[in-house]
Amino acid sequence: MSKRGPDIEEAFLEKVNANRRIIHKVCNLYLKDEAEKEDLFQEILLQLWRAYPNFQGKAKFSTWMYRIALNTAITGVRKSQRKVPVEDREVEEADVIGEDTLLDKKERSQVLWKAIYSLSDVEKAIIILYMESYSYEEISEMVGINVNHLGVKINRIKKKLKAILSPHLT
Amino acid sequence: MQLEELKTWWQEHESGQMDSEEIDRKMLHQVIRSRSKSALASIKRNIWLEIFLLVLPLWAMWTYVLWKEASIDVFFWAVGILTLVNISFYGIKLFRINHTPLMDPNIKQSLEKLVWTLGTYMKMYMFVGVILVPLGSAIAVYWGFFHAAAGDGKGFSDIEPWILLLLLGVMLLYGISSWLFFRWYVNKLYGQHYRELTNCLKELDVQPSA
């Protein structure tokens, strides 16, 4: 039993459960191994619980959750313990060019994940927030860089992804 | 390809994902009770382990000084200084670690704090390894020979030069070994993590050209 009492626990669980897919998305973004994903899931949940008294409701709960989940994934867990194998991260263009461009949904997902795994940790954070339809202002605030810098970074990410994904989007 | 296409693709993919299991109280309690795997929590555990390992020799030295030694001599001061330095060293480390919130307002600030904390620890470890350990050893060796010589009715100046040279050589060797050990230990504890975090921070600091 925690020291904060059942009411606080209930409120916390209700909010977290309503947005729990955020934690899964972040885990999937940074890890491939199921056991490691489970560890990261628990670590994020623990950090959310610890930080919960500081949640003041100024931002949306989901935004606050993203912030903590990404912070935990990037800075909180020793990366040597959770490194995605290099062969899985680096997707050579040769791997995808020449394949059938009419991929089914499962294959498309695999290619998408491979493309995302080839990004750096910071780029992954930016792209997930972008794909979740956060505005440039919100993303720049969450990442800690200015909007112009963010625009340039997103452009670079786009070029990187384009090299890998374009054969499958035609 | 436009990023909008990718966004649609992502959202399609996400909508196809099965909904995950709901987090209940039991799971929450289990997580709260479990050991954090965060870098800061690991550092904190390492600090406590080091404190525990340090307490035994310090306790043994103080027992010797207070119960066996009647006079307050160089050994007393050496042990006193060693104890004070270690208390300060670990006190600062624990204070910093307890005041380093993992959840800063943004990723860049979290990275900056963590990189600073890890960088400071690495420097402190190297200071201990390169300066304090060899110095403490030198004092202990000096004291040991001084007392041994006094026991034989000799002054320190009566010790033959080749013995002093030998002692100097041993201290030098000890200093180099200590430096190598600490370099390995610091790198094993924080090295890779520090480098990766520093790279992430550089990526955020560098203003890329369009």
Image (cartoon, coloured by chain):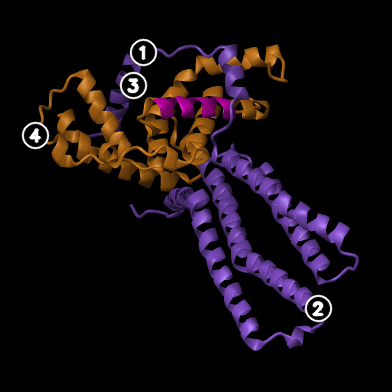
Determine which of the numbered discs, if any, sits on residue B11 in the image: 3
Query: Which residue is identified by label 2?
Result: B150
Q: In this picture, which residue range is highlighted in magenta?
A: A35-47
The CA span between labels 3 and 2 is 83 Å
The CA span between labels 4 and 1 is 31 Å
Q: Please rate how many residues cluster around mark 1, counting C-alpha atoms within 10 Å: few if below 14, some from 14 to 19, many from 20.
A: few
Name the subunit of mark 4: A
Say if B209 sits above or below B109 in the image: below
Q: Work out whether residue B153 or residue B31 is closer to the camera in this orientation and state it.
A: B153
- The answer to whether residue B4 is left or right of residue B159 is left
Query: Where is residue A94 shown, x and y percent of the image?
Result: 14, 40
**Chain colored orange:** A
Tag 1: amino acid = Met
Tag 2: amino acid = Ala
Query: Which residue is identified by label 1?
Result: B18
Residue A16 location, quadrant: top right
Query: Which residue is identified by label 4?
Result: A98
- The residue sitting at 69% across, 12% down in the picture is A6
Query: Where is residue A3 shown, x and y percent of the image?
Result: 72, 20
The CA span between labels 2 and 1 is 81 Å
Labels 1 and 3 in the same subunit? yes
Q: Main secondary structure of the magenta part?
A: helix
Q: Nearer the viewer, mark 2 or mark 4?
A: 2
